[in-house]
Image (cartoon, grey):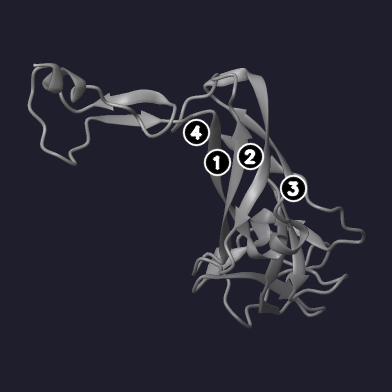
Amino acid sequence: MQDKLSGASVTAPQDGIISKRYYQEGYYAKVGTALFNIADISELTAKINIPEGQISNIAVGGLADITVPAYPDDKFSGMITRIAPVADMPARTFAAEVTVDNSAGKLRGGVYANVVITAEPKENALVIPMSAIVMREDQRTVFVVDDDGVVSRRVLTIGFVSDNMVEVLDGLSDGDRIVTGGQNKLREGSKIKLEGQGAK
């Protein structure tokens, strides 16, 4: 009897919180069968995707500000602990992980989070409205207008992306005139009326 009782003690390999119980008291379990699912939430990881154009300004060890809709009045801090060495295609984004200290136990695993990373500032960046971009065959493009009102399509390499502005790394030059509305109806060589000019 004593041997049976001594074999009934179960020791977890690590500290944590029981998040799932697979067997109730009195059930028989085979050797090697999982009895509980134990979660260590003292440190959580937020998974994010970094666009190709921003990856050069972000590195492991960088800080991040995190907000969680479930806790609208709280702000959390994290650190970038991993950046994938290869981009995910066709989006050309790099999977990354931000580690968040949760020693206070306020956060719960699996909640949705907004992560803001402050990249190194850039001077004289070329930016255009997000509304000007047209996706064609998984490529970000814009229509450029010449002095005669004829449009041509340009493929862009983009950098930083905000809510309504996009940094252009390649594909446009300062001073280029672009179409910001109705461009989904345009095609290469279309002719449009320039603002301030009469119909042609």
Q: Nearer the viewer, mark 2 or mark 1?
A: 1
Residue beneath label 2, please?
115
- In this rendering, does residue 24 appear at all? no
Residue beneath label 1, please?
46
Q: What residue is drawn where x is 57% and y is 77%? A: 187
Q: In terms of secondary structure, where does tag 1 sit? A: strand
Q: What residue is drawn where x is 26% and y is 26%? A: 10
Q: In terms of secondary structure, where does tag 2 sit? A: strand
Q: Tell me, for residue 21, which label it has, or none.
A: none
Q: Is residue 76 above or below residue 56?
A: above
Q: Of marks 3 and 1, which one's residue comes earlier in the chain?
A: 1
Residue beneath label 4, please?
112
Q: Nearer the viewer, mark 3 or mark 2?
A: 3
Asked if marks 4 and 2 touch (Cβ < 8 Å), the reply is no
Question: Which three-letter amino acid code belongs to the residue tagged 1?
Answer: Ala
Asked if marks 2 and 1 touch (Cβ < 8 Å), the reply is yes
Question: Which three-letter amino acid code belongs to the residue tagged 4?
Answer: Tyr
Q: Nearer the viewer, mark 3 or mark 4?
A: 3
Measure the alpha-carbon separation of dots 3 and 2: 12 Å
Give percent across and percent down for residue 178. 74, 67
Nearer to us in this view, 187 or 162: 162
**For the C terminus, which image quadrant?**
bottom right
Q: Is residue 59 above or below residue 151?
A: above
Q: In terms of secondary structure, where does tag 4 sit? A: loop
Nearer to us in this view, 86 or 165: 86
Give percent across and percent down for residue 64. 70, 40
Asked if marks 1 and 4 touch (Cβ < 8 Å), the reply is no
Give percent across and percent down for residue 53. 70, 64
Q: Tell me, for residue 62, which label it has, or none.
A: 3
